[in-house]
Amino acid sequence: MLQLYLQELNKLKLLEQDEEAALWAGYKENGNLQSRKQLIEQYQPLVFKQAIRITTNHNLVMDIIQEGTVGLIEAVENYNHTRGVAFSLYAQHRIRGRMLDYLQREGKAGGLSIDQSVGESPEEKPSLLAYLNDTAMDIVKMTERNYCIEQMQEAFKRLPAKEQMVLDGVFRLEQRPQQLADDLNLSLTHIYRLQKQGIRRLRGMLSKLISEFKND
């Protein structure tokens, strides 16, 4: 099944910018369902890319590809093509979120932690959680750690959209700041400013929690 899926991906032809723009206009402005279908097909490689970042287990990968496709469909339906934000950047958050929700729901996360990059240990690269505190928080018990992560997730959802995209791009998706700047049509300076603002805002929302762990 995976082999058939990959064969279909290999048949896809990269759209020119004006071709994709026409599809978005056709779907969003005229309700053309064929345009919607083409957009979903065009961005299937994005689903596969996110899936293999999470697991290479053949018994699991097709399940999360299916979940990621649901996330892709939701992204296509909710995306505002007039805002100037790259769809790939917008969509990967929903795709990955759907996949991780599935793994947690089915008890198949296998130790995946939302506050670190897949395939990396906390020692190899600082997580977003670590950046919320000037010194790494000593969270001894796993239950305390998970609670802290859950609180950070909730706070993260309350950030302005562009701050969410920048922080998620830098800390979870490991994108280079210049790539983020290009995707969001912003200057590199603005990307760094959004990153600092987002971290400052998260620190404010989580100040009580951070203080509690500092004092433990």
Image (tube, rainbow, N blue to C red):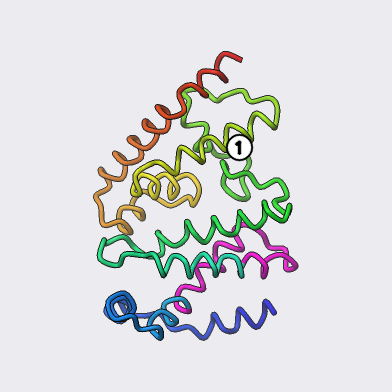
- Say above or below: 97 vs 35: above
- Say above or below: 23 vs 61: below
**Highlighted range, magenta:** 41-64
Residue 35: percent from left, percent from top: 38, 82
Residue 66: percent from left, percent from top: 61, 70
**The residue positioned farthest toward the front in the image shown:** 31
Task: Identify the image quadrant of the N terminus.
Answer: bottom right
Disc 1 crowd rating (10 Å Cα; few below 14, some 14-19, many 20+) is few
- Residue drawn at (52%, 34%), measured in percent from left and top? 129
Residue at which label 1 appears:
122
Judge from the rendering whether residue 153 lies leftward or rightward of residue 181; answer left or right: right
Q: Nearer the viewer, residue 210 or 27?
A: 27
Q: Nearer the viewer, residue 11 or 96?
A: 96
- Residue drawn at (70%, 32%), measured in percent from left and top? 142
Q: Nearer the viewer, residue 125 or 130?
A: 130
Task: Identify the image quadrant of the C terminus.
Answer: top right
- In reply to whether residue 7 is colored magenta, the answer given is no
Q: Nearer the viewer, residue 81 or 126?
A: 81
Residue type pointed to by label 1: Pro
